Image (spheres, rainbow, N blue to C red):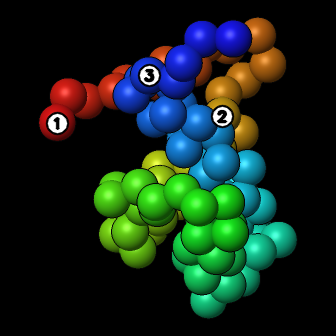
Amino acid sequence: MCAPTEATRDLHDVERVVGPLTGYVQGRIAATDFLPHLTAAFAASGDAQPPWLTEAFVAGAAARYRSLMGQWRATPFGGTMEVVFEPK
């Protein structure tokens, strides 16, 4: 097995957030429970919480998810949905 690199650690952090974030935006995890749950999960595993995992990040990700789902639902069957990623 290869030693973890910064990139693989970053990917691991992202994967640990994506599942719960999906549950949050779908209403299966309460907003008040989301960040405390993830903070506890990172602490329990002895890992530092990523610095980007903030309330502002969660709010922005949830808004983007909802926007994309609305766009997807509005795309006709057989149509094309284009997703644009703006550089920051």
Q: Secondary structure at mark 1?
A: loop
From the viewer's perspective, is the residue at label 3 or at label 2 nearer?
3
Instruction: Identify residue type, mark 3.
Output: Thr
Q: CA distance from mark 3 to mark 2?
A: 35 Å
Residue name at image x 54 percent, y 18 percent? 3
Q: Are marks 3 and 2 in contact (CB under 8 Å)?
A: no
Q: Quadrant of the N terminus?
A: top right
Label of residue 47 in the image: none
Residue name at image x 20 percent, y 28 percent? 87
Residue 41: percent from left, percent from top: 68, 67
Q: CA distance from mark 3 to mark 1?
A: 24 Å
Residue 80: percent from left, percent from top: 61, 13
Q: Is residue 50 above or below residue 33?
A: above
Residue 72: percent from left, percent from top: 66, 34
* Residue 68 showing in the rendered view: no
Please report whichever mark, 3 or 1, sits nearer to the chain's N-terminal start.
3
* Residue 73 showing in the rendered view: yes
Q: Residues within 10 Å of mark 1 (few under 14, many from 20)?
A: few
Q: Which residue is mark 2?
A: 72
Q: Which residue is mark 1?
A: 88
Residue 85: percent from left, percent from top: 34, 27
Q: Is residue 39 above or below residue 47?
A: below
Q: Quadrant of the C terminus?
A: top left
Residue name at image x 54 percent, y 44 percent? 13
Quadrant in the rendering for residue 29 = bottom right
Question: Between residues 52 and 77, which one lies in front from this camera angle?
Answer: 52
Q: Residues within 10 Å of mark 2 (few under 14, many from 20)?
A: some
Q: Is residue 83 left or right of residue 1?
A: left
Q: CA distance from mark 1 to mark 2?
A: 24 Å
Instruction: Identify residue type, mark 2.
Output: Trp
Please report whichever mark, 3 or 2, sits nearer to the chain's N-terminal start.
3
Label of residue 5 in the image: 3
